[in-house]
Amino acid sequence: MSTDVSTSSTNVAGVVRPQGLLGVPLAVEPLNRKDFTSDQEVRWCPGCGDYAILAAFLGFMPELGIKRENTVIVSGIGCAARFPYYVDTYGMHSIHGRAPAIATGVATAREDLAVFVVTGDGDSLSIGGNHLIHALRRNVNITILLFNNRIYGLTKGQYSPTSEAGKVTKSTPLGSVDAPFNPLSLALGAEASFVARTIDSDRKHLTEVLTQAAAHRGASFVEIYQNCPIFNDGAFDELKDVETADASVIRLVHGEPITFAGGRLGVHRTANGELEVVEVAEVGTEALVVHDAHAEDPAYAFALSRLSASGAVTRSPIGVLRDVQRPVYDDQVRDQVATASGGRTATEQDLQQVILGRDAWTVAG
Amino acid sequence: MTTVQPLDRVVIRFAGDSGDGMQLTGDRFTADSALFGNDISTLPNFPAEIRAPQGTLPGVSSFQVHFANYDIMTPGDRPDVLVAMNPAALKANIADLPRGGVIIADTAEFTKRNLSKVGYETDPLTDDSLADYQVHGLDLTGMTVAAVKEFGLNRKDSSRAKNMFALGLLSWMYHRPVEHTIGFLGEKFAKKPEIRDANITAFKTGYAFGETTEAFAVRYEVAPAPMPPGDYRQISGNVALAYGLMTGAQKAGLPLFLGAYPITPASDVLHELSKHKKLGVTTFQAEDEIAAVGAALGASFAGHLGVTTSSGPGIALKAETIGLGVMTELPLVVCDIQRAGPSTGMPTKTEQSDLLQVMFGRNGEAPVPVLAAQSPSDCFDTAVEAVRIAVTQRTPVFVLTDGYLANGAEPWKVPDISSIDPIDPAFATEPNGTDAKGEPTYLPYLRDPETLARPWAIPGTPGLEHRIGGIEKAEGTGNVSYDPANHDYMVRMRQEKVDRLADRLPELGVDDPDGDARVLVLGWGSTYGPITAAVRRVRNTGRSIAQTHLRHLNPFPRNLGEVLRSYEVVVVPEMNLGQLAMLLRAKYLVDVHSYTRVRGLPISLSELAVDLQTEIDNLPGEEN
């Protein structure tokens, strides 16, 4: 596990503080979901997947055991970006695509804050693509929740960078000719140290994944399949309908063989190293890939991410694809400052000396 | 026998190929002159290309230094001495040298091939075409190579020390002290002893050559300039800006967080600040200009002093985030080291053409205070003031400097930091209102009745959790609001908050020693030097002229309208097409005379002096 219990600490309620939250003060009294619920009326469309995500988030936050006032949620623009208003912590609803950049400033400035980014597929994969990949590359200690509804909702239904090819929308009456991103592949290509996917409708799984994401030190990337009932209703039905879900959702559990469809299908590594879906009966359980989220080589997680085609949800891996430790940007920045300053706050005399420089001269009075 | 002639002032231009080390040579001559006690002013001028093809006109890099025994205002329009390390350097600069000027040229580089590269059919050093000048053709390369032979370097490395030979020779000619440069070279090349020894030897040999040769009949002396007592150092605008930001942060008790993306001519501010982690400075080299300002704003939200530095093209990219800073009313200092535009323009050349961009270059009504520095050392004071306004008013603030100030250097009387007033961030720690249920609550947009600044509660403060963002805020609560009357009110409040700053700014003073001037010359930013020098020249002709200079461009000083209306003619020199003039005309309905030069160089003081005299002489009733 990425969580190193030996360096964790607990509060009076016995809450364990994982690596990702080291430095964030623990709440003295246990908190509940009501403490995290703001007084603002939630204004998403009826039936929007965002409600379920918010509910799971409000339930999961108290479990972290950290102080509410040391939590910051930064969002960009889009339906999902209204999220911070509904959580009674510190928050900023910023501008389109820039939340990872702003969150990088917050997280680098303050070790004692738990920083979340809430974004959507347009916000972080289109206009803000640059900031997303660089936050992941740097491994800033933030948790990114990407609500992927595969459509532009707030602007009323244009295709997004995760919409399937050929999608007919207001801006693509003859069908989209854009090739979509696979967000997991993108995150892995950007050197992300924690990459996961979950579904809005599966609260238990959503909570589990978010908990692991918050526990991870470094940038955690969580793609959340989220239904937009107005402009892209049913985009994930294949993963939710009882009849099809079984054969379409590939649940990943660290240390266990990858099987789905009630154990009928599984993931097998071919002789040339590729992953393929096979009938378990044909190869035997022992020939299945045992999921290792901590594999150093990202090629394995990347291969998992490709089990579903870009722009399609059939055979979507769900769960934590990758969870590895590597140096964290903001920790290292703070370490450099702390080492240089020897941990002491600079005085006015220190500054005066620097400004005077080494080649000063004195004009006598 | 060499005679010694005292001079009041000298302008030297070192010119050579981009790889010839002309910037270093100029820097060293400047440092030695400053340490000697002269007043100095410098103008580095280099191509954007790091190494343009060798020996070509686009590859010429130059450094002009003006040093004097009195307080000078500019690096000088025209050099007295031109050091030309190759034919391209001569050709690119000869037009600026007045007749009778001194040329020192490295004959080793005046080969047929190098001459033809720049279109010389015959060698100008020997074909009499430079008969009006005092030409000293010297084999600088050859003498350098011979002098450093003992260190076993190859010819290329040996000849690279020729700039130090030239510096040694000029140091002899102008009685410069040598020990500082020797010490400097010792440190710079400490890890490469043979290069270090070669450079020091070349420098000393150049000096000794001056002493022994009979080529130079005259040696010059420029006495130290009288300066008020105190500790002095040489400073460039970018370094002064960095120090000012650090000082402002220190005075506010806030850690400094710089978000920046490399861009000419602003990168040196990033370089300088990144050296000072020991003082608690954090620098973030972002993936782009937008992330740079975004991270800075995030750091401000978290309670640090967020700063971003850039130049015109980068400022354009930051515009949306600066608007977010206006809406969220968070402290943010944005430094625009202006360069010639539009678009990529001329990255290494100076201009003042971003004034309207920083005033208005955002969507919506998004007022931002704007300050401009007038000299390299003034970048320090301007930065401290910008931090003060940003922190106390909770607003983005623009600092305008430009390429000329950024790279130019002058002596600076180092201020006593303890004499600068502290800056109080006054973080909110307690609820400041009550909610509908009568419970204590935090109202993030409850303004100070006098300054209109909002409270600043940072994450980690219990009980003051709140959300801010780019959507219009309801007065007081800061909740999302689409209420028409609230929007009208908030738009006006944000404007009023900036306008009211003028109440706390000093009134604009005017320098009008005779009290009878009819013409006022009004500038802003780096034109201060050339304007002041031109005004001196005009006054020396017996004419009266008044001068004033704006530090505060938004809001303007409260008496500016009165000042403008006190003179028959107001001349506004700018390195743009009249951007300040447009603002003045719009706000005060005064038909100022716009005087514009956009050559990528500081305004010529001699040209300006003549034009100002014409303005005066054209007034009815003037007899001059």
Image (cartoon, helix red, strand yellow):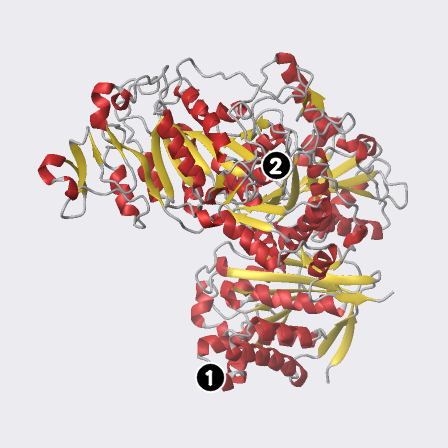
Q: Is residue B535 above or below residue A92?
A: below
Element carrying mark 2: loop
Across and down, in percent, residue A9 comes to 51, 45
Q: Position of residue A75 (x, y in %)?
A: 49, 30
A100 w.r.t. B220: above or below: above
Separation of marks 2 and 1 at Cα, in angstroms: 63 Å
Give the residue type at disc 1.
Answer: Gly
Which percent across, then down, holds residue B191?
Answer: 52, 74
Q: Chain of mark 1?
A: B
Location of residue B79 (image quadrant): bottom right
Judging depth in this view, the residue of B206 and B131 nearest the camera is B206
Q: Residues within 10 Å of mark 2 (few under 14, many from 20)?
A: many
Q: Earlier in the sequence, mark 2 or mark 1?
A: 1
Q: Which mark is residue B216?
A: none
Q: Residue at x 49, y 25 (%)?
A: A83
According to the image, label 1 marks what residue?
B152
- For label 2, the residue is B460
Q: Are marks 2 and 1 in contact (CB under 8 Å)?
A: no
